[in-house]
Amino acid sequence: MDDPVAHYEALLDETAATFHGDGGTVLVAAGATVAEVVDALGGVSVEDVPADELDPEAFTWSAYLLTAIDGGVLAVEDTGYADPPTAVLVALSRGGRAAAVVRDNIQAHQRFGCARDGVLLFDEHEYVYLDDRSRVPAELRELFDRAWVDLDDDAAVDDGAEDGTAVGLAMAEVVTGLHLIADDTRRLASDDATVVLVRVLQYADELEG
């Protein structure tokens, strides 16, 4: 079997401009429709947003691109600050479904979160630096360890670990069963993709709350 982390490293390299770039959020939802994901995210059309809130310096909204893929939905945004709160993951996973989010931002905060059948399985704002690895679901532990950095081990910090986004996407596949390929990401750049605006910092507000 192909190495899933290598697969996603190659995918990120191949589609960086559309799919990931210098940061962003990747949300995958198995068993959901695009309309359901838009509703869960609180997405709105640009016409419904006051003009003053569209000023980039205001940084109130971020654009999500969404597309249906085989088995569910792929949604991305390119700032890493409009990642969904955990309630969105839980909502999208109800009824035997599953959802996962992988996020990176300019501050190098790499998040992984996932839910299945209405239950939050795991969520961590900076998952690669997690102190208590016993929190990681057993089905994800082997992949998780490939990105984990032991801050108490100077050698581990210096050597680094495998790409946290690629590992996160591999873990998302385990949870959701959705295997992302380049054709999926190319749909995000097509005229068929759905574009909505989502308020930024909802997850950050959840952490602070």
Image (spheres, helix red, strand yellow):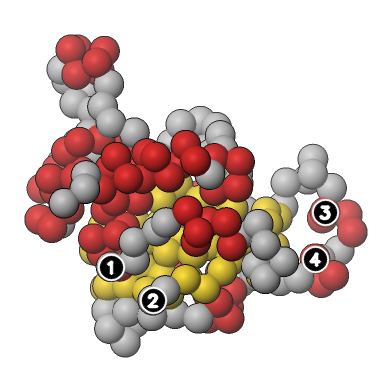
User: With 130 as the anchor, is 104 left or right in this view?
Assistant: right
Closer to the N terminus: mark 3 or mark 2?
3
Who's the residue at 34% across and 61% down the image?
179
Query: What is the CA distance from the residue labelled 3 to the residue labelled 1?
Result: 36 Å
> Dot 1, how many residues are within 10 Å of its Cα: few (below 14), some (14-19), or many (20+)?
some
Q: Are marks 3 and 2 in contact (CB under 8 Å)?
A: no
User: For residue 177, which numbered disc appears in the image?
Assistant: 1
User: With 193 as the anchor, is 148 left or right in this view?
Assistant: left
In what element is the residue under mark 4?
helix
User: Type of residue at label 2?
Assistant: Gly
Query: What is the CA distance from the residue labelled 3 to the residue labelled 4?
Result: 8 Å
Q: Are marks 4 and 2 in contact (CB under 8 Å)?
A: no
Query: What is the CA distance from the residue labelled 4 to the residue labelled 2?
Result: 28 Å
Mark 3 lies on residue: 54
Who's the residue at 84% across and 48% down the image?
55
Closer to the N terminus: mark 3 or mark 4?
4
> Dot 3, how many residues are within 10 Å of its Cα: few (below 14), some (14-19), or many (20+)?
some
Query: What is the CA distance from the residue labelled 1 to the residue labelled 2?
Result: 8 Å
Q: Which percent across, then down, holds residue 174?
A: 23, 60
> Dot 4, how many residues are within 10 Å of its Cα: few (below 14), some (14-19), or many (20+)?
some
Q: Are marks 1 and 2 in contact (CB under 8 Å)?
A: yes
Mark 2 lies on residue: 71
In what element is the residue under mark 1?
loop
Closer to the N terminus: mark 3 or mark 1?
3
Query: What is the CA distance from the residue labelled 1 to the residue labelled 4?
Result: 32 Å
